[in-house]
Amino acid sequence: MTGTGNIVARLPFPTAARHELADGQLRANLRRATHTIRDKRLRVVGEVPDWEALREAGAAIKDDVLARLPELLEQFETAATAAGATVHWARNAEEACAVVTGLVQATGVTEVVKVKSMATQEIGLNESLAAAGIAAVETDLAELIVQLADDTPSHILVPAIHYNRSQIRDIFARRMPGVDVAGLTDEPAALAEAARRHLRAKFLSAKVAISGANFAVAETGTLTVVESEGNGRMCLTLPETLISVVGIEKLVPTLRDLEVFLQLLPRSSTGERMNPYTSLWTGVTPGDGPQTVHIVLLDNGRTDTLADPVGRQALRCIRCSACLNVCPVYERVGGHAYGSVYPGPIGAILSPQMTGPDGGANRTLPYASTLCGACFDACPVRINIPEVLVHLRQSGVDAGRGRPSTERAAMGAISWVMRDRRRYAAALRAARRGSAPLRLATGWRAADRRGMVRRLPWPLSAWTASRDAPLPPAQTFREWWAAHEEVVQ
Amino acid sequence: MRIALFVTCVNDLVFPRTGQAVVRILERLGHRVEFPMEQSCCGQMHANSGYRAEALPLVRRFVNTFAPYDAVVAPSGSCVAMVRESYPRLAASDAELAAAVDAVAPRTYELSELLVDVLGVTDVGAVFPHRVTYHPTCHGLRMLRLGDRPQRLLRAVRGLDLVELPGGDECCGFGGTFAMKNADVSAAMLADKCAAVCGTGARYVAAADNSCLAHIGGGLSRGGTGVRALHYAEILAGMQVLEAEQALDSEQILDGTEEAA
């Protein structure tokens, strides 16, 4: 079943990107933030002597999980159930939201606290709960900022990366209930203190918490949340009821496998050697922590993604967001341009696979990359993102065969010309000769002495809109060679 | 050793001087270079745009053309990366083609690999008395892992002042059809790259790929910066560029339209 929820781009990527590029403040914020995390990551990754071996291990463990996913999921369900948890299965966003909303309604509360979670963002849980009259309070600081601003996250790890601290100060002053507006500065400590006061009251009164999970251990039925602030720990321990929405690819076979990922994840995501809080829980512990524990296992397009032998490596993703921070495209446009809650390089391969070939504007996402390869180098589980991007482009092209396409006609014609020596040589001559009138047509003065031209007709105008174009000189290489060197037949 | 030049289609038509430079460098080092006329395009644009069916005949053509040679050299990081990294994947479903790719791909070298690794040369005897910065293009950097081979070759050039390009490992925003399909993002990346280049005070920005250089050079030209993009092979060829430089400098004086460098 194809995935649904907040994983569909509403606008084609180039259109959405143009809109985001117009925001100079956004670009400055993104540049500063991504470069800071990038440098931190490089430092802490560089100090691990066996980093490449760890990446190989991470990829191998996840590949093993994907190869025997049904068996491990059943093992997880059995273990979690034996430990007192109730396991639910959801095929898509609507089913997952319905299960969670029903569980919250059964408790009778109208407010829940939330641990930062991509899975619940993916299924649009907050909107679904709101429709049922239930307020979901985000407790992760950055998620809280985004929620107060009535905005959407623009980064997997740092959802408010598109704001700077003075913008955050303004959001708090306008939207945080009971905040001391006069005393609020844009100092990080002051902003954190305001959030702490706001959230502490929520933690102490909450009866129900909702989380995701970074890892789910099949052999023990254990869930894991990795975080920096400790707000997640509050949610995981104080309320009576805990509901966790977990993507089915989050499994690891054994507790011991966490050793690899708990090294890979913090260094790749926040650029820390170790994250401050790692919480593990296994079902219900009588007299300690939540006494009612639910786990919603979410498919939402993951099984379809698993069916593709090349594309399935995207399911290794541990949501560290290192690929976003090193991506030159993400750095310019930010997360909102990708539409989906999964932005950047990983989003460009994950969202279109989860929604399938009919995913509307998601079809434009595999083209939102120069294939520069920075993401592959940074990925802690060695997802070859450029390979999958090209693979998805190919799937799109192949699906479109049989329908007329200017681009395909051009690609076919170029391939036909390139296949034959005489055709190729003739085409080179024609292109060289053709460029002479082109100079005249676009204005002689437009072409400078080095053969650079300022304006070309459509479709090459997309090039000359922002750069001059080189024109072919009087002689092709092969003409020069034929005249000056011995020809090798 | 039989060395064949794969000039690449872009260089054949638009940047023939780069191909000429490779020939001059290798001949100056005492090697005979052959240019098989059957060559055309490696198929990178087709393959990277998702047109595998259209790319495959070009893969076949490349391996047939270059099978007889001991080494194939191309002045293009991305075309060599296409052959070495993408050909095996494209050919995987055709055992015969896959075997032909296995034979040719490992012997296909980017110029700096041939010079430094195969021929064991870093000083090619060139002269270029200018300040130069080097942009290590993505496919050379992250697919071929060229490392500092091109820079080592440039540092050995007499008179050349090589200055580091800040953020050099960041993509310039070309990306093949990306430059057209996502023109706005490409232009934003280009603007940052041009600013970094200009900040070095270099008169030339060199690289191992004329496609990236057409993009960067086009931006520098549009901005009226006076900084020029030049394939590093043309710098290593030395004399040829000096002659061209003198010709251009005299034109500048006569024409009076060039920006001060």
Image (cartoon, coloured by chain):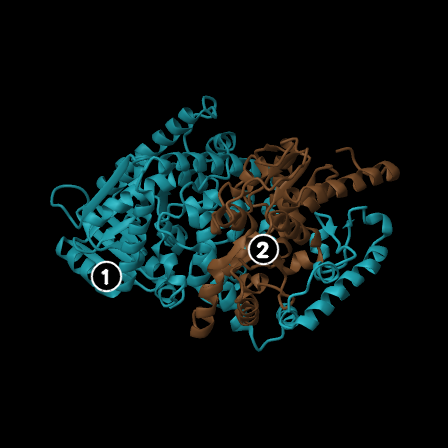
Residue A64 placement: quadrant: bottom left
Residue shown at 78% from the left, 47% from the top: A450
Decide which of A482, A226 is in the foreground and name it.
Answer: A482
Residue kind at label 1, given as amino acid type? Leu
Residue B58 placement: quadrant: bottom right
Q: Residue furthest right?
A: B254
Shade of chain A as shown in the rendered figure: cyan
Residue kind at label 2, given as amino acid type? Ala
Decide which of A485, A270 is in the foreground and name it.
Answer: A485
Place of residue A300 in the rendered image (x, y in percent of width and height, measured from the top left): 37, 62
Place of residue B221 in the rendered image (x, y in percent of width and height, measured from the top left): 73, 42
| Residue that numbered label 2 is attached to | B74
* Chain corresponding to brown in the figure: B
Q: Are marks 1 and 2 in contact (CB under 8 Å)?
A: no
Place of residue A461 in the rendered image (x, y in percent of width and height, measured from the top left): 73, 55
Are there few (<14), some (14-19), or many (20+) residues within 10 Å of tag 1? many
Q: In the figure, B45 relative to A445: above or below?
A: below
Residue shown at 68% from the left, 65% from the top: A487
Compared across the picture, whether A86 is left or right of A460 comes to: left
Decide which of A136, B239 is in the foreground and name it.
Answer: B239
Place of residue A112 in the rendered image (x, y in percent of width and height, measured from the top left): 31, 45
| Residue that numbered label 1 is attached to | A73
Chain ID at mark 1:
A
State the CA–CA distance, disc 1 to disc 2: 50 Å
